[in-house]
Amino acid sequence: MAVMSCDILVVGGTLGGCAAALAAAEMGAHVCLIERSNWLGGQLTVQGVCTPDENQWIETTGCTARYAAVRQAIRDHYRNHYRLSETASRNAEFNPGSCWVSRLSVEPRVGAMLLLERLRNSRNGGPIQLVFNARPIHSEVKKDRIQAITFSDADGKSFQVNAHQYIDATDMGDLLPLTGAEYRLGAEGRDQTGEPDAPPDPHPDWIQPFTYPFALEIRHYGENHRITPPSDFDELNKLQRFRFFDGAITGAFTGKYPWWSYRRIIAAANFEDPHFQHDIAMVNTGSNDYQGGNLFGSEEDIRYHLARARRASLGYAYWLQAHAPREDGRVETGYPELRLVKELFDTEDGIAPMPYIRESRRIVAMCTIQEQDIVARTSEGEICNSGSRARAFPDTVGIGHYWLDIHPGGGGEAGRFMETRPFQIPAGALVPMRLSNLIAGCKNIGVTHLTNGAYRLHPIEWAIGEAAGTLAALCVQSSTDGSAIIQAGPTLRRLQRILVQGGAPICWLTDIPYNHPAFEAAHLLSAAGIWPLSDADLLFRPDDLLSQSEAIELLKPLSSQIALPNATLFEPIRADRFAVLLAETVQASATNAGILDPLFRKPNPISRAEAALAIHSVIGDG
């Protein structure tokens, strides 16, 4: 059996896996990434959710710089390869599909190609060795430490990989049962988590449904592209309740939230190019959320549900073509002009090669994120986070925001859609309680069934992976393991600093972009609790002048000896006066205080950004 060795093994080419591999390699680690399919990108590509579920700040400060680079590469691809309409070409935030669920769309194969290029051209770091069409089948674990993982390739041949650190970036937490890691699956009971909206008793069968998306092209009226329905169409129609959205038909194509443009990936109006003459939309709605079972049973059960779920999606495509009520006044039913775009995935039936997985096995982690940590209020109206942000985690390694979104599945659980506050990703959620060199890098982090519904989306999964890869590389560099790094103040702060220097926000500060001079200082001081954040909004206000009262509050955590005349508390403080106070507070000399030296000679008021830079330059990671 062939044996490979590397610093870090990333299992799963999901968005989390790609982010982990890039982050680790750019820190100099030798990375091997192994994916069971022949596509990179997980939910964005091979699973067909190619209109990413993001947040309202995604274009500026709501994701990592690496994720933003992927989004820019998508836009550049369409600008460089196709002739855009005049309106689209002028739009800096060009959205190829003009979909309303997202500010961006991409054809699945394009997304996979761009991610492959990015991993193959990883800059300033170690190599990334890519292996496709291989799945993990065995592990060797000694004294709570993974020694090796064995894989089976497409030809049935086995090979083994030895690594210092192992990142599980699979959609279903494949390494967890394989390595004996403690994990949870389905809904925890209220006694386990203390979550107000958890069921009284555990429900391991309450697992969010998986979905096989498919793409439709809307052609001219009069064309007939109806497919042959599955032999069990009637049974599937009853199981899935084929419909537009939640049964509403009015407005399906033309209303306020039109069904067609929901996840449209190509809007023909955006192009003046013969390649795109018709709209193409990806179909991923409640009607093809598979209601018949889940993928965590026996191999025979998994094969059965995968095949049936594909037929359910084909059945929905046929229902749209033959049975959907029309909105154009015509008496017939169905839209036979909708063409199943088989070439988009190059699958025989036109359905996505892999199902979209919403919920994974989840590690029993050092920190488990609970409902009350992120929701604005519970379903009963109990307020959990009254300010502008969710709970602050001192070990934060990333940010995210999405609703707590639970799709109803076949286990009898009702759906939920709850408001959350912009939240953080604690490092403790990436590290299991026992296995020392395993790190979670995808949906398998320490979340509950409920909070998984908010942490499973594209930019959040990427941020999780980027943090996991950075943590793993730091483990390799320091010859230690994840739990030791995040439990020690200096190494935790080093982890946070590396992330922030790489353009990964770890606090919600929506007016500090990656290229702002105070980006690093603002995030690290805020994460450490030294810089107080507003409860009213997500702003840092870098250009505002610092008042003397604010200066006192900033320096209080560093020393209790600071005092200023009460008469001038609310007036702006001069930079030279602030520099003196800061130097005295931390016993820093004027000549060795970095940014303090010019501040000592500056009689002008100091801005909040300048103050953050001054504090950070003096205290560093301390």
Image (cartoon, rainbow, N blue to C red):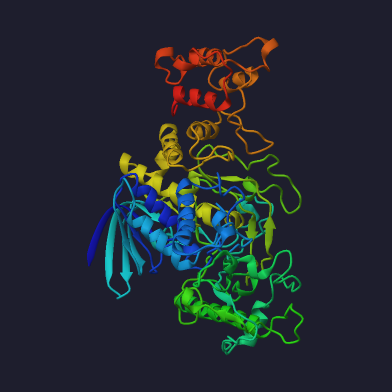
Above or below, 146 against 566 in this view is below
Task: Indicate the position of residue 172 as horizontal and vertical percent values.
Answer: 48, 63
Q: Quadrant of residue 403?
A: bottom right
Above or below, 217 against 597 in this view is below
Q: Judge by depth and name the residue closer to the eye, 215 or 8.
A: 215
Q: Residue at x 31, y 71 (%)?
A: 153
For this orientation, the residue located farthest to the left is 2
Q: Residue at x 58, y 85 (%)?
A: 225
Q: Quadrant of residue 41?
A: bottom left
Task: Indicate the position of residue 471 as horizontal and vertical percent values.
Answer: 40, 45
Direction from residue 585 to residue 9 in the image, left or right: left
Direction from residue 580 to residue 494 in the image, left or right: left
Q: Quadrant of residue 322?
A: bottom right
Q: Judge by depth and name the residue closer to the eye, 261 or 148.
A: 261
The N terminus is located in which quarter? Answer: bottom left
Residue 137: tell me if it is visible: yes
Above or below, 153 against 385 in this view is below
Residue 179: tell me if it is visible: no
Q: Judge by depth and name the residue closer to the eye, 133 or 124.
A: 124
For this orientation, the residue located farthest to the front is 86
The C terminus is located in which quarter? Answer: top left
Above or below, 428 against 18 in this view is above
Q: Residue at x 59, y 70 (%)?
A: 284
